[in-house]
Image (cartoon, rainbow, N blue to C red):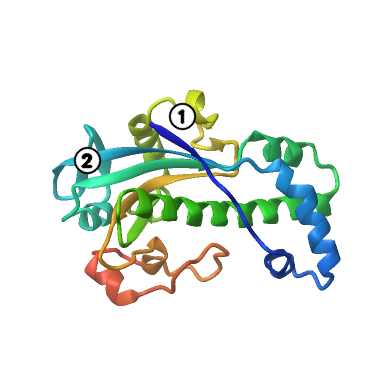
Amino acid sequence: MIVEPLEVLFSTGDVQKRLRLKDSEAAENLIDWAVPLISPEAAYRVCYVEGRGDDWVDIDRVRFASRVLLKNLSEVGRVFAFVLTLGPVLDEKLGAAGDLLQKYYLEEIGNLALRRARVGFERLLKKRFNLEKVSCMSPGSLPDWPIDQQKELFELMGDTEAELGVRLTDSLLMLPRKSVSGIYFPSKVSFFSCQLCPRDSCDGRKAPFDAALAREYGVQCE
């Protein structure tokens, strides 16, 4: 497992847009307040596809049941399992926050920082392994790959609590909460799980729903 510190950069304009603030000075003050609470790091493992079935794929002797993941890895040999976190301090501050507005600001700045950290991590992977394009899937992002497969992902990763300070609870919640996990893989065309999900009200949507692509992947959409 390799652990990498990450840099998170966002502008006053980013925070203003995210929080719908008209006052730039207020946004700057929030950045000054929140940034010291954020310590982004990513742990990742270079892994290899070892077997494939009708609706499963084996990665380093761990089996993942997902037709979508299987299709995405049909011509891929090497993948990158990862866990990324903003660290415990922001979580502690959120838990102690009594003011609802303060809590909202922290939550939203944390969400923004998590997105920026992922962008930085993707750049790191592409540069370090000379990859032109990468895509990512995470357990729970689609019904085809349910959240309970977080157990297998953390089994694949190893002792993330010792190395990164992130643990998976019995209810499949990652702690600290501002953490994400998944598998990156080289891709010729960018893939987003959002393309297979028809749900409209999703703040984290990265791409529009594509009904034709969903049919290609054999995903039933309600």
Disc nearer the start of the sequence (2/1): 2
Residue 17 place in picture, x, y as percent: 70, 70
Give the side of residue 141 with respect to residue 106, left or right. left
The answer to whether 25 is drawn above or below residue 65 in the figure is below
| Amino acid tagged 1 | Thr
Left or right of 57? Residue 112 is: right
* Residue count near mark 1 (Cα–Cα under 10 Å), binned few <14, some 14–19, many ≥20: some
Residue at image point 34% right, 64% down: 191
Residue 201 coordinates in the image, percent (x, y) = 56, 68
Taking the image as drawn, is residue 54 in sight? Answer: yes
Which amino acid type is marked by label 2? Tyr
Q: Residue 181, located in which quarter of the rendered image?
A: top left
Q: Quadrant of residue 20?
A: bottom right
Q: Which residue is mark 1?
A: 160
Label 1 element class: helix
Kindly tell me whether residue 145 is visible in this rendering. no
Q: How many marks?
A: 2
Location of mark 2 (residue): 48
Q: Position of residue 141 (x, y in %)?
A: 42, 54
Q: Nearer the viewer, residue 78 or 58?
A: 78
For mark 2, give the secondary structure. Answer: strand
Q: Residue at x 38, y 27 (%)?
A: 158
Question: Toward the viewer: 222 or 89?
Answer: 89
**Residue 213: x and y, percent?**
28, 72
